[in-house]
Amino acid sequence: MKKILKPFPEGFLWGGATAANQIEGAFDVDGKGLSTSDMVAYVDPYASGKVDNFTFDVTSEKLEMYLSHPEKYSFPKRWGIDFYHHYKEDIALFAEMGFKTFRLSISWPRIFPTGEETVPNEAGLAFYDAVFDECLKYGIKPLVTLSHYEMPIQLVQKYNGWMSRELIDLFLKYTETVFKRYKDKVKLWLTFNEMNMNLTSIYTGAGVLADEMENPKSVAYQASHHQFIASALTVGQCHKIIPDAQIGCMINRIETYAETTKPEDQLQALRADSINLFYPDVQVRGTYPKFMLRYFEENNIEIKMAPGDMEILANPENRVDFIAFSYYMTHVTHASEDADELSGRLDSPIKNPYLKLTDWDWPIDPIGLRITLNKLYNRYQLPLFPVENGLGAKDELVDNAVHDDYRIEYLREHVRAIQEAITDGVEVMGYTPWGCIDLISCGTSQMRKRYGLIYVDQDDSGEGTLKRYRKDSFYWYKKVIETNGAIL
Ligand code: BGP
């Protein structure tokens, strides 16, 4: 059999991805309100002798401590990499690599500091105007996530986040404001980042305090329901206000393999996969999939819905135009594992002996990306956009250089997998590797977990010159973009 690979399509959106809470810093500058991510304290993952990928959930007791004694803690997401004051330099570096798009998020509390103001914060709006103008100056299309793991902290204190229906209108006020303001500058949007992370980290995903849950699954699905309604109405708003825009949903996509050929294990893998796909199912098809109704009943999950909710989801105007997802790893499962615990987990409790691991024990599986692209496309027939993928590694800056051949290899293999999927017939809009510039880790709040093509001189405690350096992967990616993927 001969192998013929199709070229990447014209206009393929090569770029990179970030989130406001992990890069901006300036957490209390120009009227910005405190956000949920400003309240995630650094916990030294090495103190316990192991790297803990999950240090980000906040309980009511912790929140109380963080608010009353902030001086006792360190909150890395408050300083980020100070993109707020370095955006010109950073966007110039993205332009030098030839980026066609740049994924970033808007910080909701920068626009509505407590979430409940009637008038938006002009300084916050002006900041994003300046950032978008800077991108457009180089022909870079902004790809904007409306909600990436942060919201005004007052909405947590007053409403327990997305557990309350009130959040829907407050969110719609914010989205309407930014759609109207940026309608001529931003044509690519995402609603909620990785909504399925609500099943793993409810504070991060939905601003719900982690201890206030009798039935955690019920809480996660209730908060998700409110976000589904908000997301659907946001999509409708966007279609109305910016008719030439495209707006997508976004999940943390995890392909799950069965550990053996035993039918029971296969069934469990199917269950895990279905739970992961529940999120795009609702947002693409506009209805709750039937398999979840059985699941809710058997797990005592009762979702309170308002009259008209199902119509909102079903309205074709409210359906997403494309599916974005992050892809970092695959999972392995077997019959005796609780499959629904897996969705969104950023580690794999059962090891896959065929895969190598990153420095943070995340399995590396480029073929899984091709499988996932094929599976999503077969299921939904919508354009797909891998908007996060990358290698978190311990880089070393020596003589102003970082020789990250391991990252180049990782990215090359994943880009090749995308090309294979395109050749299989899958429609892929672009590729935006995560953390195109080093940033604060979402899961561990570390700086040393670096994904970037650009090195930022800063350590876990926020010390450093903040100077930016091009890594070897920077030059490699530049060539990839220049040749539209012909040279990998
Ligand atoms: C995704 C998040 C990102 C990002 C990435 C890497 O789940 O959307 O915000 O940080 O994971 O995770 P980490 O930073 O924990 O390595």
Image (tube, rainbow, N blue to C red):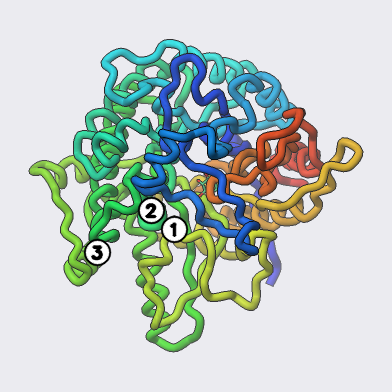
Is the Cβ of the residue at disc 3 closer than 8 Å to that at disc 1?
Answer: no
Mark nearest the camera among 3 and 1 is 1
Give me the C-alpha separation between circle 2 and circle 1.
6 Å
Q: Earlier in the sequence, mark 3 or mark 2?
A: 2
Mark 2, Cα crowd under 10 Å, few <14 / some 14-19 / many 20+, is: many
- SS at mark 1 in the image: loop
Q: Which residue is mark 3?
A: 292
| As drawn, 483 above or below 219 | above
Q: Is residue 280 visible?
A: no
Seen as rendered, the residue at the extreme bottom is 262
Give me the C-alpha separation between circle 3 and circle 1.
17 Å
The amino acid type, in three-letter code, at marker 3 is Met
Is the Cβ of the residue at disc 2 closer than 8 Å to that at disc 1?
Answer: yes
The amino acid type, in three-letter code, at marker 1 is Gly
What residue is at 46 percent from the left and 12 percent from the top? Answer: 123
Q: Which residue is mark 2?
A: 196
- Percent from the top left, x then y, of residue 37? 46, 38
Give me the C-alpha separation between circle 3 and circle 2.
14 Å
Please tell me in which quadrant of the rendered image residue 341 appears: bottom left
What residue is at 35 percent from the left and 65 percent from the top? Answer: 274
Q: Which residue is mark 1?
A: 344
| As drawn, 323 above or below 214 | above
- Percent from the top left, x then y, of residue 260? 50, 85
The amino acid type, in three-letter code, at marker 2 is Asn
| As drawn, 263 above or below 227 | below
What residue is at 20 percent from the left and 45 percent from the top? Answer: 314
Mark 1, Cα crowd under 10 Å, few <14 / some 14-19 / many 20+, is: many
